Amino acid sequence: MSYTSRTQTAISDARTDDATYLTLQSCPACVWPVSVKAPTCPQCGHPINAYKSSATMVLVFGVLSLLLPMYGVVFGGLAWGFGNREVRGIDAGLRVASGRTKARVGRVLGVIGTVFWSGVFFLFVVAMASSGY
């Protein structure tokens, strides 16, 4: 009996008391059959149920925070917050580690955009107040 047919047989025969099937998936790193409820692969330690990375979204928000004057503070705050969450998730092993650089760059751009556009807004308010409006 081949490895694949044994795995398929184990999947079809495995039932719990409440009549739900045990669901297995292959580890993306070592192709070892692992339960979908397992946090990591028992063979290689690769995270199985890692959430999808939102690092690209963080990077886009960070760039938008620098480019859009009216919404720079909003996008900067989003990049800052989501970037912190993404890096914490990577450190905890809940997200794939390949997005760390994008998340960190997006977070830094978000901080720069937030501080820059907040300063511009503050200077605008001071200039308007000093001119008598």
Image (cartoon, rainbow, N blue to C red):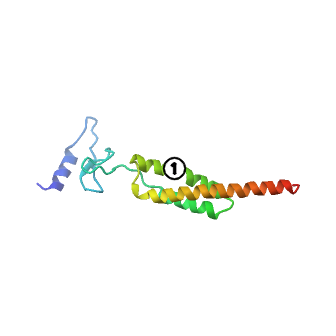
**Residue type marked 1:** Asn
Residue annotated with mark 1: 84
Q: Is residue 78 visible?
A: yes
Tell me the quarter of the image containing the N terminus: bottom left
Q: Residue 106 placed where, x, y %?
A: 53, 58
Q: Is residue 44 left or right of residue 111?
A: left
**Residue at position x 46%, y 59% in the image:** 101
Crowdedness near tag 1: few (<14), some (14–19) or many (≥20) residues, C-alpha within 10 Å: some
The front one of 120 and 36 is 120
- Name the residue located 77 percent from the left edge and 57 percent from the top edge: 124
Q: Could you say whether the residue bearing mark 1 is in a helix, strand or loop?
A: helix
Question: Which quarter shows the C terminus?
Answer: bottom right
Q: Residue at x 62, y 58 (%)?
A: 113
How far across and down, in percent of the image, does residue 81 sit?
55, 50
Counting from the top left corner in percent of width and height, residue 47 is at 34, 50
Q: Please tell me which residue lies in front, 78 or 22.
A: 78
